[in-house]
Image (tube, rainbow, N blue to C red):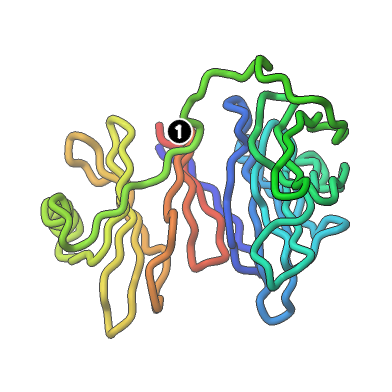
Amino acid sequence: MLKVFSHKFPQNVWRILPDSDPDSDLWAIELREVPAKKASFAIIDLKESKLKWHESPEGTDWWTSLTAFSFGYLFLHNYRFPDLPQPTDLLTVSADDGELKWVLPNYLLVKSLNHKSIEVATKVGDQFKYFKCESKTGKLDALDENIYQPDSQVILREPVRYKEGNIYFDKLATFIRESTLGHQPVSIDYLEKRPFMMFSYYIYEQEKMLEYLLIVSDKMERIYHEKLSEGRDGIGRSTILLKGSRLVYLKNNNEFSSLTLP
């Protein structure tokens, strides 16, 4: 049986990121309330199947964006000059309670180094200067090039998109048409985790687009089929995400959904 979880927000979901800790089942969500120009952030705990919190942390505004989620901390970039598409400040928020932990003005996140440190940069003249930063406190230290970094591993898997003109599109479209008794996709996102094949695909209906999720086993058994949205004007990005056995997807722009593959 598939374990399905869903939570609907009053705002539109802008971005979804899992904690880079392989053992974590937390997912960070950036949300936007467009008419009010208000941004907020949330954490969903899929282990407990619940919304952990949903807040607009201190120091954030409409221009704040989620840039990374690593080992229990959300890293946000602020843009003090909205006319310039460059981050100006780095904010860190606790995934436990949504509280602002620290701010580094004039710094930006480069990457996560390990479970307790990140790499940050600040501009000095025309050059960037790089530092190691403690995730918990924001304390800066000289960057040691020999600092331990875990072996690179794929934490999050995103789909491959196939559109008309791609050499594999017709084959996948025929498979979907036969599996759904007639749906003719115009765009297909595909992920594979044996023994499952996962498709997020779009069809035209009355000059609008509808999006569906289809999961099929390697024995050609239809495991799951659901309409994700209808009346769309266009095609979304990163429509399905996979971390471990958790498949995460978005419904109607504001509903975070997931299912656990057996």
Residue located farthest toward the bottom when viewing the structure as drawn: 206
Residue at 31% across, 38% down:
192
Relative image position of residue 123 (x, y in whole percent) = 75, 47
Residue at 25% across, 55% down:
162
Residue 120 vs 4, above or below: the answer is above
Q: Which corner quadrant holds the N terminus? A: top left
Q: Nearer the viewer, residue 28 or 215?
A: 28
- 105 vs 37, left or right, is right
Relative image position of residue 160 (x, y in whole percent) = 32, 48
Residue at 29% across, 84% down:
207
- 168 vs 29, left or right, is left
Relative image position of residue 250 (x, y in whole percent) = 49, 58
Q: Nearer the viewer, residue 17 or 130?
A: 130
Q: Which residue is denoted by mark 1 in the rendering?
A: 245
Residue 40 vs 45, above or below: the answer is below
Residue 91 vs 204, above or below: the answer is above
- 240 vs 201, left or right, is right
Amino acid under label 1?
Answer: Ser
Residue at 72% across, 66% down:
63
Residue located farthest toward the front when viewing the structure as drawn: 125
Q: Which corner quadrant holds the C terminus? A: top left
> Disc count in the image?
1
